[in-house]
Image (tube, rainbow, N blue to C red):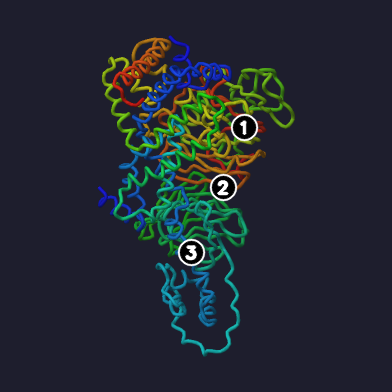
Amino acid sequence: MRRLDELALRLMDGPLSPTEHAELDALIADPANEQRFLQLMSVHHGLVALTPDATETGAVMRAVWRTESSAARIKVRRKIAPRRRRRSQPPVLVFALAAAALLVVGLGAILASRSSPVPPPAPVEVVDPTPPVPPPTPVVQPEQPAAPILAVASVRGERDELSAGGSVTASVPARVDRVGDDTTVALEPGAELEILAADRWRLTRGLGEWVIAPQPADRPFRIATPHAEITVLGTGFELAIDPTGSEIRMRTGLVRFANLAGTASTDLGAGEAARIDADGVLTRIDQPPPDPAPQPVERPAPAGPAVAIARWDFSADDGEVLRDISGGGLDLRIGDPARVQRGPDGMRLLAPVRILSDEPASALSRAIRDSGAFTVVLDVTPARLPPDYDVADIGTARIVTISADPYQRNLTVGQGELRTGWDVCSLRVRAPQMATSHNGLPAYITRGVFDEERRVRLVISYAAGGVMRLWQDGELVHDERDRGGFDGWDLGYHLALGAEVGTDADGMRPWLGTYHALAIYDQVLSPQELP
Amino acid sequence: MASGDRQLVEAVLAGDLDRYEELVTGAHEGVWRTVAAIGLDREACRDLVQQAFVDAYRQLSKFRSDGDFGSWARGIARNLARKELRRRSCRYRHEDRLRSHLEQQHQHEEEPDARLAALRRCRDRLSDDSRTVIDRYYGAGDDIDGIAAALKRTAAATKQLLWRSRLALRKCIEAQGEPA
């Protein structure tokens, strides 16, 4: 085979070395060779063009749902703007509204339209239950104080403030944070939330996943639904409302779940669930007890501190071995120890190097698959690739991956967009609807995680068929629900750091930077729940 | 088609975001080809295609009611692809030449279809095993080991078959006199 052909063919399948690039340059100085090279490469790119990725449509739609679309923003903003409109009301109306604030669901669009030169742009689901008040005598009207901000609604960067009476109808996944503590609810599209008071919110319909910060014992947080009321002292749970009832599934903590008449109630702890139907009938719908069969990896007790199923010590210098100090036995081997530098601050990758498990990460993958959930805690400082490295060819840099090669994976946390290798954290979880793909597509992609060369602590949690969340330095920056699952996880894949698993000694898709900490759990955890 | 697109776009703008998936499905193949024509690998193509549809979604209110959504989305993708070409640095002569070559091809919107049609004809003339290795490598995204197992060959022999198949396609294209 011609050397020109060999180099071109290899270029189609992966990066060439700088020497080979230079050799190829020399060969195409001959116009005939250049023509042949261009023809060959055109065949390759033509074959790529001929075979669009059929799984891409799903990824596109996920990206669209995530995007800050103007349509979505407007739709949410219209629902959560009563406070701004209220500022223009006559004082007597404001007084009446304030007096009723703890009882009412909101301000009516009729009130808004009385003093507004144009009708409100969309129906606002707030009403004023107080009797009609005669219009005030037109005297000098003092500046009315703004209503206190009780919560902030967020839709991928768009933030709107909510006061008592404000409501949110989520047309895309949205989050509402309580002002004053870390209480938050993630709303699914279609969910509707009203802020009745600082300590009393109402989920009218749809699904919300709640994390309630610890509350004073004498001032519990209360959540109303059309069928029930939940009294909370600090916990996490999922609350689903449909016309036939309200259903709660506990994750952590303790709540009292009662029907509206107060005739039936139950206390629910972690892992427990109950439902109150439209007639007020309360039913416990707890999950059956876990399978008593022995588990491959020891699980933490539900109420106890979380225990990692893999955790590596980056500061200890054990030569070519990176020890798993969780007790799980998943030690990793550094391909070339001269390319790393270990110290009290962690392990720095000085040059592309793969750090690979000797054996497949079967126990770890099995534990995650069986539990249906994982949390990856990653504390790293990214570094730019050296200038002589061909970033145009390396793809998403692998920070941690459980995979077979660049195309078959259980899970990858990586960095890089269009091979610029900088500003994206992508998390790939194989999804059951992608049965023909072994690449875990579509990827969860979050921008802005690695914008600069600074230390960042990421907590990534995922539950099968549930919610993927990413916290960056303690702040929730990505939150979405998906149909992904673990049924297709391959227990034969190795775990690698710094590069992709494969035949190349240094690995493909190299990542450079410093690992300060890395731990993996087989349960969903938030930063607050981590040891 | 344009009438159907208009209805779908209006539905999306009215808040029925699920209808956008129908627009994406209909336009996806053309957008993919537009992006792939600039010479990125599959992973990069996925990113650009995704970005093109996200941008199209954001600009949907600008979509002309008498237009074709696919053409409009391809235009957005083409602009993104050109930006990406300009962004990529070429440190080697062969990269620079390939980029210029692909840029020239990109100037002529009709040519990719002719090139791809010629390539498809050539692919259809390959032997069964060659066509299998090409289809699995490019279409299904399988790796060499997976294809080797399916063909009951060694990985080395499968890689050689993939390489020979590409060379055969180049030769076929050249013989057809089609733009390569």
Q: Pointer 2: what residue?
A: A476
Between A138 and A186, the residue placed more toward the observer is A138
Q: Quadrant of residue A473?
A: top right
Chain containing the residue with disc 1 = A
- Answer whether labels 3 and 1 touch (C-beta < 8 Å): no
Q: Position of residue A191 (x, y in %)?
A: 42, 56
Q: Residues within 10 Å of mark 1 (few under 14, many from 20)?
A: many
Q: Secondary structure at mark 1?
A: strand
**Residue that appears at 44% across and 80% down:** A114
Q: Residues within 10 Å of mark 3 (few under 14, many from 20)?
A: many
Callout 3 and callout 1 share a chain: yes
Instruction: Measure how far apart labels 3 and 2 are at the Cα level.
Output: 21 Å
Chain containing the residue with disc 2 = A
Numbered badge on residue A335: none
Q: Nearer the viewer's eye, disc 3 or disc 1?
A: 3
Instruction: Measure how far apart labels 2 and 1 are at the Cα level.
Output: 19 Å
Q: Pointer 1: what residue?
A: A518
Q: Secondary structure at mark 2?
A: strand
Please count the marks in the image: 3
Q: Is A136 rendered above or below residue A366? A: below
Quarter of the image with the C terminus of chain B is top left
Q: Pointer 3: what residue?
A: A80
Q: Is A319 rendered above or below residue A253? A: above
- Answer whether labels 3 and 2 touch (C-beta < 8 Å): no
